[in-house]
Amino acid sequence: MPPAAPLSPAAPAAPADDRIGLAVAVILGTVLALSLGDALVKALAGGFALGQIFLLRSLLALPLLLWLMRARRVPLWPVALDWVALRSALLVSMWIAYYLALPHLDLSVAAAAYYTLPLFITLFSGLLPGGRVAPLGWFAVALGFAGVLLILRPGPEAFNLWALAPLCAAMLYAAAMLLTRARCRAEPPLTLALWLNLGFILAGIAISVASLALPGQGGFLFAPWAALDGPAWAALALMAVALVIGGVGAAFAYQNAPPALIGAFDFAYVGFALLWGLLLFAEAPDAIALSGIALIVLSGLLSLRAGRPATPSPTAPL
């Protein structure tokens, strides 16, 4: 995560200890990993249950997380448990909404619908004290959203009821990332990733138990568990690694740079989704879709310029 857009028009001024260049590089690697993980979820959606994927993926990711935390002496317990729990709940709900749409939409269409989230980041950021965005930042938001519309090309096939699911996911992700910066900035990214995985494990158990009471109902959400072969376990292992990268990377990026800026580069997910769609599902982007990707990249560059501090801090390499 899925994770997202030139967004936050009204983000607070960047603190002196922001590490913008590193945060941008991290979010690009993060969305690459998350897009691959989401493509694998789409590939497995026809034969596996969502609860099964949540539970097994997180159980595979947990040892890696705990090893990294021990090696880096990162605390298991968060500073603000209530805010971290709320953040995890928002992100788990986001992934449920997004994953439910994947069996019913092309990967690129689902990604484009999800990346309406700059509008929600803009709206939510305006509620933060001291929120302010330069005119160039607003232009970057509009440009990035125009790129998403070029990819989505609203029509009877793209806009069906299932397209509402990634829109809901966008709202949840926007709220979670602003919460990360406003209330969870002191938390180590690995701690946030650990608690997100615990949230996935709880959600996987709850969904799996519910599927026993609702056999055959709810499609992907309440499907029965399936037997796993070697390739399926390999896919789950890749998804587990992607989940760790995504959980740590998104937390780090939004902690260390303005949400408006990181959101712009978060848009790269759409381009990666098009790539995986081509490689895994033979969904070939046309000239219009490629134009949309170009606009999204340009919006990220403009947002970087708009969000860059006038006087860089010596502790915040660009």
Image (cartoon, grey):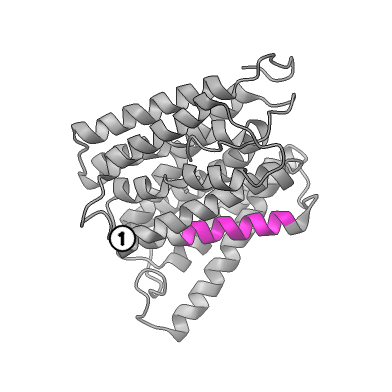
In percent of width and height, residue 46 lies at 30, 64
Residue at the spot 77% in from the left edge and 51% down from the top edge: 78
Looking at the picture, does residue 66 appear above or below residue 226? above
- Specify whether residue 141 is painted magenta: no
- Look at the image and say whether residue 90 sits in the magenta stretch: yes
Residue 49: image location, x then y, percent: 40, 68
Counting the numbered discs, the total is 1
Is residue 138 something that shows in the picture?
yes
State whether residue 67 appears in this view.
Answer: no
Q: Which residues are magenta?
A: 83-96
* 142 with respect to 240 (left or right): left
State the SS at label 1.
helix
Kind of residue at badge 1: Pro
> Based on the displayed image, in which of its 4 quarters is residue 249 positioned?
top right
Magenta span: predominant SS is: helix
Q: Where does residue 111 sit, x and y in percent of width and height?
A: 37, 47
In-front residue for pair 126/215: 126
Q: Residue furthest bottom?
A: 213
Relative image position of residue 200 (x, y in whole percent): 57, 61
Measuring 41% from the left and 72% from the top, which residue is drawn there? Answer: 225
Q: Quadrant for the C terminus, please.
A: top right
> In this view, which residue lies farthest toward the right?
79
As drawn, 272 above or below 58? above
Tell me the residue that label 1 is attached to: 103
Nearer the observer, 280 or 100: 100
Dividing the picture into quarters, in which one does residue 45 lie? bottom left
Image check: 307 left or right of 3?
right
Instruction: Identify the residue shown where x is 20% and y is 44%.
Output: 282
